[in-house]
Image (tube, rainbow, N blue to C red):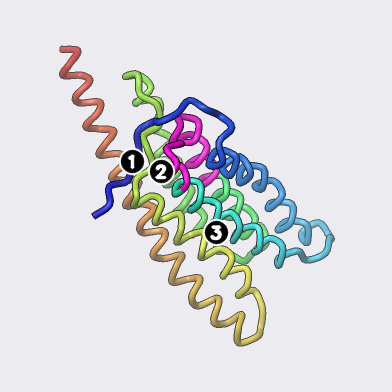
Amino acid sequence: MEVQETRVQTDRVLTIPNLLSMGRLVGVPVFLWLILWPVFGGPNNDGWAVALLMASGVSDYLDGKLARRWGQISRLGQILDPAADRLYVLSTLIGLTWRGILPWWVTAVLLAREVFIGALLPILARYGYGPLQVSFLGKAATFNLMYAFPLLLLGNGDSWISRTAGVVSWAFIWWGTVLYWWAGILYAVQAGRIVKAARAAAA
């Protein structure tokens, strides 16, 4: 079984993996503009929005893969990668909910998980720890959601392709949501162990 390297290996900023993560971050406002433009009377750009989401998913896979293969895991990359993941998820939730494509309660469930994780960060910071590394389960959850959202956009129509895409997208949404919360709970457990160890060391 291959063991994935996660420790920091370089202090370089301008690496290919970091540039991919930066590109994903730049794409977030572009995606929001594409998906929300019809709300303000502009043309429908769902095709471009789907293409951008797909490109984001590919780059999300590549930045981690290349960083490990080329020994370019950096602290900046460990911050940029989950930040880009969360911003894409949040921007997609906002856009799809505003358009009425995604029910508000799905958005509420996923946003509640972000609030839950966010509440742990000040506790970790109090003991000198930053955000914890993204787990494999968390990445799997994000991949499921990033597959689900483009399919949900494609399912916004009346053709058989749209109907099929809609069914498949909801399968990914349900599975991704469960994994998203599961990863969040494991994150909380890990944070609890760190805090407990820090308190024991200080006693």
Residue 103 falls left or right of residue 134:
right
Asked if the residue at tag 2 contacts the one at tag 3, i.e. Cβ–Cβ closer than 8 Å, the answer is no
Q: Pinpoint residue 203: horizontal percent, then vertical percent.
A: 15, 12
Q: In the drawing, what numbered circle is on residue 5? A: 1
Residue appearing at x 37%, y 37% in the figure? 133
Residue segment shown in magenta: 66-86
In contact (CB < 8 Å): disc 3 and disc 1 = no
Report the Cα–Cα distance between label 3 and label 1. 38 Å
Residue occupying image coordinates x 66% and y 63%: 51
**Which residue is labeled 3 in the image?**
104
Residue type at tag 2: Arg
Locate residue 155, reporting x and y percent. 60, 75
Q: Nearer the viewer, residue 199 or 69?
A: 69
Q: Tell me: 32 left or right of 13.
A: right
**Which amino acid type is shown beneath numbered disc 3?**
Trp
Per the image, label 2 sits on a secondary structure element best described as helix
Residue at label 2? 68
Label 1 sits on what residue type?
Answer: Glu
Residue 159: say if magenta. Answer: no
Q: Is residue 199 visible?
A: yes
Query: Would you say the residues marked 1 and 2 are in contact, meaning their CB atoms lie under 8 Å apart?
Result: yes
The disc at residue 119 is none
Q: Bin the neighbour count of mark 3 within 10 Å (Cα to Cα): few under 14, some 14-19, many 20 and up.
A: some
> Closer to us: mark 3 or mark 1?
1
